[in-house]
Amino acid sequence: MATVDVDLPHVKDDDPHHHGPAKGLGRWLFTTNHKDIGSMYLIFSLCMFMIGGIMALIIRAELFQPGLQLVEPNFFNQMTTMHGLIMVFGAVMPAFVGLANWMIPMQIGAPDMALPRMNNWSFWILPFAFLILLSSLFMPGGAPNFGWTFYAPLSTTYAPESVTFFIFGVHIMGASSIMGAINIIATILNMRAPGMTLMKMPMFTWTWLITAFLLIAVMPVLAGVVTMMLMDIHFGTSFFNAAGGGDPVLFQHVFWFFGHPEVYIMILPAFGIISEIIPTFARKRLFGYSSMVYAVASIALLSFVVWAHHMFTVGMPLVGEVFFMFATMLIAVPTGVKVFNWVATMFRGSMTFETPMLFALAFVVLFTIGGFSGLMLAIAPADFQYHDTYFVVAHFHYVLVPGAIFSIMAAAYYWLPKWTGHQLNETMGKLHFWLSFVGVNITFFPMHFVGLAGMPRRIPDYALQFADFNSMASVGAFIFGFSQLVFIYNIIQNVRVGEKATAQVWEGAHGLEWTVPSPAPYHTFSTPPKVD
Amino acid sequence: MQEQVKTKRLVVRLATAAVLMFGFGFALVPLYEVFCDITGLNGKNFNEGPAAISSIDRSRTVKVQFVTVNPADMPWEFRPNERTMRVFPGEDKVTAFYAKNPTPEWMVAQAVPSVTPSEAAPYLHKVNCFCFDRQPLEAGADTEMPLVFVVDPELPKHISTITLSYALYDLTDNQKVTQSSHNNDKGRASL
C-alpha cells in the first residue's frame, strides 16, 4: 500500500562508519552516496533544461514572425535537433534518475543504492556525453541538424561531419542510463526493508522499477541503431543505404522500436510522482493502488507493439496500419484508469493547494489533453493529415512539458524540504506555478491550430496565415522560459534560508521518507526500519 | 554474504539482458527482411526467374507503369522506353530501359526496384531484369537494358494498376566495399 506504519529507526551517529560527507570537490567526484549522486543528477538536469530552453527560445524567436530574421535555416535545424536531444536525454531522463537516487532508497528503507560505485560512474560519464554533443555546435559544418529522430539516410549520407560525435554522445548516455537502470532494479528487488513487500511499495518506486526494465530493453537498441549509422558512415556497410541493398525504412522501425518505449520512460516515473503527491494533499489514500500498478505494467508492455504509429505514412500494408492503430488506442485504457484513479483519490478529499499539488493538478489536466491529441494522431487515416505538422509538436509538448517537466517540478517542490530542511516559500512557488501554467498553454495550445491548418514542423519560415498563432506561441514560450528563473531562485533560496521543516513536512504525507528528519541525514536507514 | 551474492546474480542477469537487446537491435535487420519477404511490406518480394504460368487471363488487362528515379548525386540519364503498358495477366512482356553515362569516367550503377501497391509485388514475376546485375558503362556510353516480366493471373481483381519503380544508384566508389555486404550473400537475389 501507499501508506505504511513504521517503527521509527533510531538514527545513530556514534558509529564510526556513519561519517558525514567528505570535504571539497572530492566529495562530489568520488561520492558513492545516493543523496549526493541524486543531487548531482538533478543539478545537471537543471543545467541541461536551461541550455535546451535557450535553444527553444532561439527557435521561438525566429518563428515569432514569418520570414527569416535571426538565424540561418541550417542553424535553425541544429537548434531543433539539439533542443530535442538535450531535453529528452539531458533534462527529463537525468532528472528522473536523480529523483530515483534520492527517493527510492528512502522510500523502501534501504541505506543506499545496491551498487554505489557504479552509481558514481553512471552519473559522471553523463556530463562528458553532453560535452561531446554540445561541442559539435562549434565544429565546422555545425551540430547535427537532422532532427532528434535522426532518420537515415539524412543522418548518414547527408549529415554534417559532427554526426560521429553525436553517435558517441548517444553511446555514452545510453551506457549511463543502462547502468542507472540496473542499479535501480537491484536496489528495489534486493534492498527493501523487512516487511516492505512489492505491493506495499510507494508508487514512485513501482513506476521506476517498470521504467528501469524498459530502459534495459530499449536503450541497447538505440545503441544498436546508432552503431549501424556509424558503420554506414565510416565502414561502408549499407544498413540504411538502398544502393547497397539496405532499407531506409528499416531505420525508422528500429529507431521507433526504441523510441516508443522511450516516451513511456519519460512519463511512467511522472505517473509515480503524481500518485505520491495527490494522496498527500487530498489527505486520502491513493484510490486503486493495485490497479495503478497493473496499469503501469500494461502500458509498459503495450509500448513494445505500437512503434509503427510514428510511421503510418511510410506505406505500410493496411493490416499493419489497422493493427498499430488499435494497439495504440488500447494504451488509452490503462492511462484512463490512472487518470480516473487520480480524480477518484481527490473526490471528497480534504484538498489543499500547495505548490506541489498545483503542479500535480495541472499535470492531470494538461497531460490528459496531450493524451487526447495522441489518440487523434493514433487514428491512421487522419494521421496522414497530421503527420509532421505542428499538431504533432503540440501533442508531444503537452505530454512532455506539462507532463514530464511539471511532474519533475512538482517532485522538486514536494521533496525539497526533505532535501534541504527548509520549508518552501509558498508565495514564490505559486508565482512560479502560475507563470509556468499560463506560459505553457499560451505556447503549445495555438500549435494545435496551426498544425491542423497544415503548418509543417522543423521549418524556420512559414506561410503568412500562420503568423498570429506563431507570435502567440513565441510570447508564451518567453513567459514560460523566464518564469523558470523563479524556480531557480526558489531552489537557491530554499537551500540557503527558510523556516525549519519538520520530518513530516506535509500534513498528509505518508511513507518512510517522511520518518527521517529534514534535512535527511547523510546516511539513512543504516538499520533497516520495520514495515508492518 | 547472501545479500551480495543475490545482487551480483541479478546484476549479471540484467547486464546480459542489455547485451542481448543490443544484439536484438541488429537481429532486427534480418528479421525485417524476412518479415518483408513474407508480407511484402517494402514492395520488394516479387518473384524472380522463369515463372511457371501456363494460362493467360484474357478477360482483363492490367496497366503496368514504369517510373525511374535518380538520387541527387547520380548523373546518368535513365528512363523507360515505354512509360506504361497494358498486359494480360499471364502474358510474357518485354520492355527496355535506356541508360547513358554522360560523365567522362567509367561508372557502375545498380538499379533498385520497388512495386506499388506492395500487395501486387508477389504477383509480378521478373523473368529477367537488368536490376539483377550491376550496370557498368564507359564514359559517354549508353545502353538499352531489358526487362522481361509476367503478371500472375492470380493477381487480385481489385488491382488494375501496378507501378514498378527503379532507383538507379552510383556504385562506382563503394563497389569494392559492397561486394562483401550482405546484399551479395545471395548474389543478386534480393534485388
Image (cartoon, coloured by chain):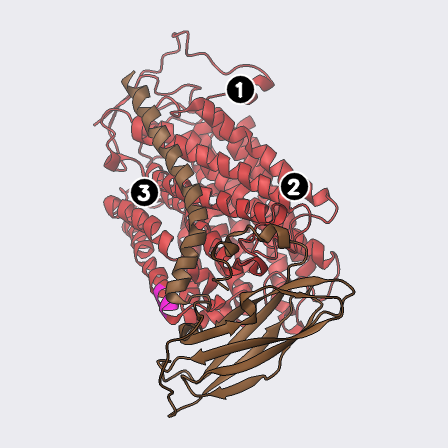
Query: In the figure, the brown chain has which letter?
Result: B
Most foreground residue, A135 or B133:
B133
- Of helix, strand and loop, which mostly describes the magenta segment? helix
* Mark-to-mark CA distance, 3 and 2: 41 Å
**For residue A134, which numbered disc appears in the image?**
2
- Color used for chain A? red
* Between discs 1 and 3, the one toward the N terminus: 1
Query: Is label 1 in contact with label 2 (beta carbons under 8 Å)?
Result: no
Q: Secondary structure at mark 2?
A: helix
* Between discs 1 and 2, the one toward the N terminus: 1
Judged by depth in the image, the label closer to the viewer, 1 or 3, is 1
The magenta segment is: A319-323
| Same chain shared by disc 1 and disc 2 | yes
Badge 2: residue crowd in 10 Å (few <14, some 14–19, many ≥20): some
The subunit carrying tag 2 is A
Most foreground residue, A374 or A439:
A374
Amino acid type of the residue tagged 3 in the rendering: Pro
Left or right of A390 in this view: B142? right
In percent of the image, x 41 and y 38: which residue is there?
A: B18
Amino acid type of the residue tagged 2 in the rendering: Leu
Q: Which residue is mark 1?
A: A30
| Same chain shared by disc 1 and disc 3 | yes
Instruction: Tell me the quadrant of the picture where the N terminus of chain A can be found.
Output: top left
| Same chain shared by disc 3 and disc 2 | yes
Q: Which residue is mark 3?
A: A279
The subunit carrying tag 1 is A
Left or right of B23 in this view: A448? right
Most foreground residue, A466 or A135:
A135
* Mark-to-mark CA distance, 1 and 3: 37 Å
Query: Is label 3 in contact with label 2 (beta carbons under 8 Å)?
Result: no
Magenta segment includes B65: no
The percent coordinates of residue A386 (x first, y second) are 50, 68
